[in-house]
Image (cartoon, helix red, strand yellow):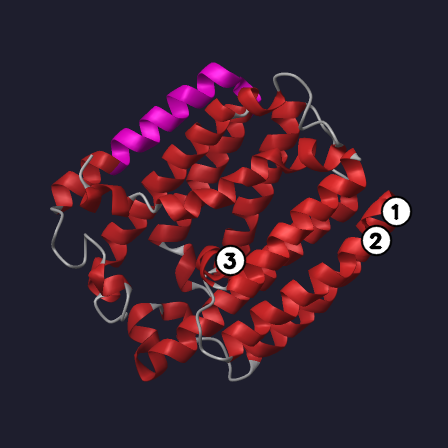
């Protein structure tokens, strides 16, 4: 696959699919024989379907992405890839991912089909509605979490469910706010939903959900006790992300984690602290 086609897959976004491993990781089962390897095929299936969704979304947004300073350089809006080629690749990835998930298990297939339906509906229409667009993105994270629970037969604690959901809403709101800042008067040309958010609404939502994330994570950590010392890292990460968005440095969660050294270090420290707390 040529680099330009690989770019369309957005491999950096595959990081989100590691959430499949969250249930066994936080349950202390990740190092048990066969756990990591048994998640490889499901991870690949999610990557295939999510990449198909990215390409499909780029196809529909190609005329709007030309107004975005970064997205206009993507293969489809820039004209480096034909519409027919992108359409065929998206369909191939979607079918491949669903066939692979069918081999894994029917419950996993049903969750991946649900993810694909929401992604397609989001790309076609739902992303134009304020609030609904944010909840669609958050639902994708919950489906990944539930898929991991199903795969590894690990029940999800209510506090973990709420933490993941609220964190996804928080990050999605930050991304929308960042887009609104960077595009200015052209924001509506790129994303219709941005024209419907009143001034200050996204700011308020971001701060509200940040507080809610902290509360639910504290409750989750209290139930696990050994995780309580990771709460300061959670708070620092939330504040750092808000600082990044408010400073106009971008709000994409994956790019923020990979490009912001402080966020990356805090994320790494959180992982190490969880490993020490649960596995030591």
Mark 3 and mark 2: Cα distance apart in space: 22 Å
Q: Quadrant of residue 153?
A: top right
Give yes or no for contact between labels 2 and 1 (Cβ–Cβ under 8 Å): yes
* Residue carrying label 2: 228
Question: Of callouts 1 and 3, which one flags the residue occurring earlier in the amino acid sequence?
Answer: 1
Q: Position of residue 74 (x, y in %)?
A: 23, 56
* Cβ–Cβ under 8 Å for marks 1 and 3: no
Q: Quadrant of the N terminus?
A: top left
Dominant SS type (magenta): helix
Q: Is residue 102 above or below residue 2?
A: above
Give the side of residue 119 with respect to residue 234, left or right: left
CA gap, disc 1 and disc 3:
27 Å
Residue stretch rendered in magenta on the structure: 90-107
* Residue 101 on the magenta span: yes
What residue is at 56 percent from the left and 48 percent from the top?
139
User: In the displayed structure, does residue 134 sit left or right of residue 25?
Assistant: left
Q: Nearer the viewer, residue 11 or 98?
A: 11
Mark 3: few/some/many CA within 10 Å (<14, 14-19, 20+): some
According to the picture, the residue beneath numbered tag 3 turns out to be 257
Q: Nearer the viewer, residue 94 or 80?
A: 80
Q: Is residue 76 magenta?
A: no
């Amino acid at each position: 696959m040529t680099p330009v086609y690989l770019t369309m897959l957005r491999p950096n976004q595959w990081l989100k699919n590691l959430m499949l491993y969250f249930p066994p990781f936080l349950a202390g089962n990740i190092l048990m024989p066969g756990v990591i390897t048994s998640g490889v095929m499901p991870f690949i299936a999610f990557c295939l379907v999510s990449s198909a969704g990215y390409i499909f979304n780029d196809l529909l947004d190609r005329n709007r992405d030309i107004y975005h300073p970064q997205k206009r350089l993507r293969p489809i809006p820039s004209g480096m890839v034909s519409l027919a080629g992108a359409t065929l690749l998206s369909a191939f990835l979607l079918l491949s991912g669903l066939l692979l998930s069918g081999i894994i298990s029917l419950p996993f297939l049903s969750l991946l089909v649900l993810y694909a339906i929401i992604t397609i509906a989001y790309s076609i229409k739902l992303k134009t509605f304020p609030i609904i667009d944010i909840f669609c993105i958050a639902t994708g994270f919950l489906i990944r979490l539930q898929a991991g629970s199903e795969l590894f037969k690990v029940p999800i604690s209510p506090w973990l469910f709420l933490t993941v959901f609220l964190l996804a809403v928080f990050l999605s709101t930050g991304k929308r706010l960042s887009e609104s800042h960077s595009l200015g008067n052209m924001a509506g040309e790129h994303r219709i939903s941005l024209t419907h958010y009143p001034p200050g609404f996204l700011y308020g939502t971001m701060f509200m959900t940040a507080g809610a994330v902290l509360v639910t994570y504290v409750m989750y950590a209290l139930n696990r006790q050994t995780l309580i010392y990771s709460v300061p890292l959670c708070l620092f990460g939330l504040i750092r992300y808000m600082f990044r968005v408010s400073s106009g440095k971008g709000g994409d969660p994956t790019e923020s984690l990979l490009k912001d050294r402080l966020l990356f270090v805090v994320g790494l420290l959180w992982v190490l602290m969880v490993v020490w707390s649960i596995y030591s």
